[in-house]
Every structure is written in C-alpha cells, then in structure tokens.
Amino acid sequence: MNPADLPPVVLEAWTRYGDPRAIAASHETSPGVSTNRVFRLELRSGELPAGSVFVKVSSYGSYVHFRQDHQRIARWVELLHGTRYEHLLAPVLGHDGNVFTHESAGTWVVFYGEIARRSATPKIFREADITQLAQEMASFHLCCDELRGSLDPTWKTLGSDVAILYDQLAEATFCSARGFTRPETSFLKRQCETFLANAESLGYHRFHRMPVLIDWNRGNFSVQLSEEGFSLFSRWDYDWFRIEPRTLDFYFLSRVVRAEGDQSSFSYLVDPLMEPRFALFLSAYHAVFPLTQRELSFVREAYRFFILNYVVLGGQHFFVPKVYRRLLREAVDHYLPSIDGADFDGLERGLD
C-alpha cells in the first residue's frame, strides 16, 4: 500500500508522534471481521536505522477509555519486566514514559512496537496440548494476579457497560435499528438485570481484578515449541483488554480447545464451555492456580456479559456489518436463551 493511501488520521498521528523516519511502505493486517484497522508501517531514513511499527485505528466507544486502556497496558508491560513474560506483550509506543495516542474527528490512533512471533497453536488440540495451554494460562494469570496491586483499575467496568445497555434498551431508536421486537427488548432487559443480580450475589466486587485480554483466538498469540511441548511466546492484540476477573478469559480459551478447534467462520454458542475438553482445561488450570466455587459460578455471567456487551451493545463496532447482523440475531435467538439451561454446575463437578 502506498503510504499516501493510509487513512489521513494515521499520517496526522505519525507527524505528531515525531519520529524522524518517513513511512516508506504500509501493509494492512486487519483481520477482516472487525471495524478496527491495523497497518504495519515500514520506516526509512537516510541516517537512522530502518524499522517498522504497527498502528491501530479505532472509533469505538470513548477516546478517554481508549487512552486509559493503553496507559494501563503500557504499565502492565512494564510490571512484567523481570518475569518469564517480560517479552510476551507488544509494547505500546510513547515518549518519556507517556503513552502516545491521537484523536481526530471521532477516530483514535495508537502505535505498537513490532513483536517477534513463533508458532501457532495446533488447530485441533490433543489432550496433552489442552493441559499445556491450561498450565501456561494459569501461570500467566498467577503472575498477573501478583502484580495487580501495582496496576490501577479503569473507569470502565462490567457493571457500567451492562447499565449502558439497559438504558439504551429504553430508547426506541436503539431497538428499531437492531430489529428488536417489544418481547425481545423485554427479554434483553431481563438478561441485564440477571447479570447484575447474579454478579452481585457471587461477590463480583470482591473478586481479584487483573488485566485480561478476552479474545484468545489462534490468530492473536504465538507459542514457543520445545521437546516438552510449548509455552506462551507473544501476544499482540488488545481490542478487548479489561481489568476484570480472570474468568473473562475462559470463554475464548474454551473455543481454542474445543473438538473442532478455533474456526474462521464463527458463532458464539455456549457449547464450548460445556465440552469435556474444557473440563480438562479447567482441571489442569486449577492445579496451578486454584479456582473458587464462586469464580466457577461466575463463568456463566462472564459469558452472559460477553454476549450482552460485545455483541448486543457494541457489536456494530467490533464486526463488519454482515457478520454483526448474523451474530446479533443469533444472540437474541440462541446465545442468551441457552445460558440458564446450560449445566454450568458441571464445571465445579468436573474439578471434583
């Protein structure tokens, strides 16, 4: 791609960022299902070493949240120094310890340093692979839990997002734009109320909060292979970063280890959480970083939140229109109605 064809906001941001190197070439690396756009910029200068950076262009939500999220991510990367995960996360670029972000006309930009990649995980996991991934994720979560006291929370919480959706469901324009009937709107409001009530009763406010990335699909991270198996090597996507209970990571991990593997053509059914393969994952995870009964019960609400927030409330910003319309209809017709009938109690029995 000719650099002149980049979105103008990227060129504005690069000028403001102040790197003396010019953008010699660019390549779009966006996954194709998201409205966010990602580009790899190749940098050239007559005197300075050549290099490359990644740039993300987003317009979802609030610039204040976008900026704060990246401030927290940069601090997270800093806190991981000296641990076995110090090279895991792609760095957020800035100056003198301050993260650089740029906003213009409702669009915002951030730059990331390029991070090395190794192998993808297997498309279909063997049982030994499931155990290995569970142990790796538990060790990573344990490390993040130990540093959480040095990482401030964000203004954005699960409760605030669900409250926004509840209020939006009272707006006729919001509902008509999504094709919700009155019974469907009432159903969605009850789902919001159920989440808030159940999260409160399970002690959500007392759960440990740590940085989570939620979207653990095979295209977002790489592993280092060895004779002993594999270990987490690098992670470069922060679209769904939160500081929340660790159980928010579990749904996508269940999709990675399910029998048919992670799929490029996808839906968000509850089924992967019910598979024996995920029970095996939880058992291996629990052996490294034990889960409480309340945390296991919260897996149901973490899944409910994911559908309510990332599909119903904000799906038009996360997915291209064709994918969004399908997922939204599936959320109302299948995903949410299936939650309370699913045997989430089996997760605890599996550990026993």
Image (cartoon, rainbow, N blue to C red):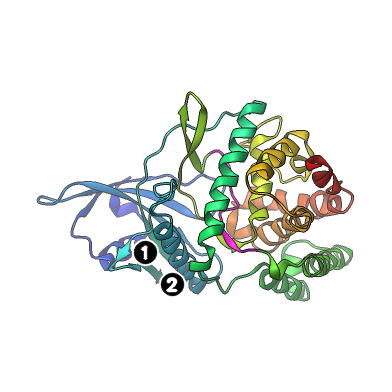
Q: Secondary structure at mark 2?
A: loop
Report the side of 210 relative to 259 (left or right): left
Q: In which quadrant of the rendered image does the N terminus lie?
A: top left
Q: In which quadrant of the rendered image does the C terminus lie?
A: top right
Please state the horizontal and vertical placement of residue 92, each as a whole percent of the image.
Answer: 38, 58
Q: Circle 1: is it few (<14), some (14-19), or many (20+) Cα within 10 Å?
A: some
Q: Which residues are magenta?
A: 208-218
Asked if the stretch drawn in magenta spans residue 217, the answer is yes
Asked if the stretch drawn in magenta spans residue 202, the answer is no
- Residue that sits furthest to the left in the current view: 47
Q: Residue tagged by mark 2?
A: 105
Q: Is residue 184 visible?
A: yes
Please state the horizontal and vertical placement of residue 260, each as a whole percent of the image.
Answer: 69, 30
Out of 238 and 253, give the one closest to the viewer. Answer: 253
What secondary structure prevails in the magenta region?
A: loop
Badge 2 amino acid: Ala
What label sits on residue 9 in the rendered view? Answer: 1
Report the side of 153 relative to 102 (left or right): right
User: Does the residue at mark 2 contact the one at mark 1 (Cβ under 8 Å)?
Assistant: yes
- Compared to residue 108, the image places residue 132 above or below, namely above
- Compared to residue 327, the image places residue 180 above or below, namely below
Please state the horizontal and vertical placement of residue 241, each as a whole percent of the image.
Answer: 55, 58
| Residue shown at 20% from the left, 46% from the top | 50
Nearest to N terminus: mark 2 or mark 1: 1
Badge 1 amino acid: Val
| Residue shown at 74% from the left, 55% from the top | 292
Q: Circle 2: is it few (<14), some (14-19), or many (20+) Cα within 10 Å?
A: few
- Residue that sits furthest to the top in the current view: 227
Please state the horizontal and vertical placement of residue 126, each as a whole percent of the image.
Answer: 65, 25
Out of 85 and 329, give the one closest to the viewer. Answer: 85
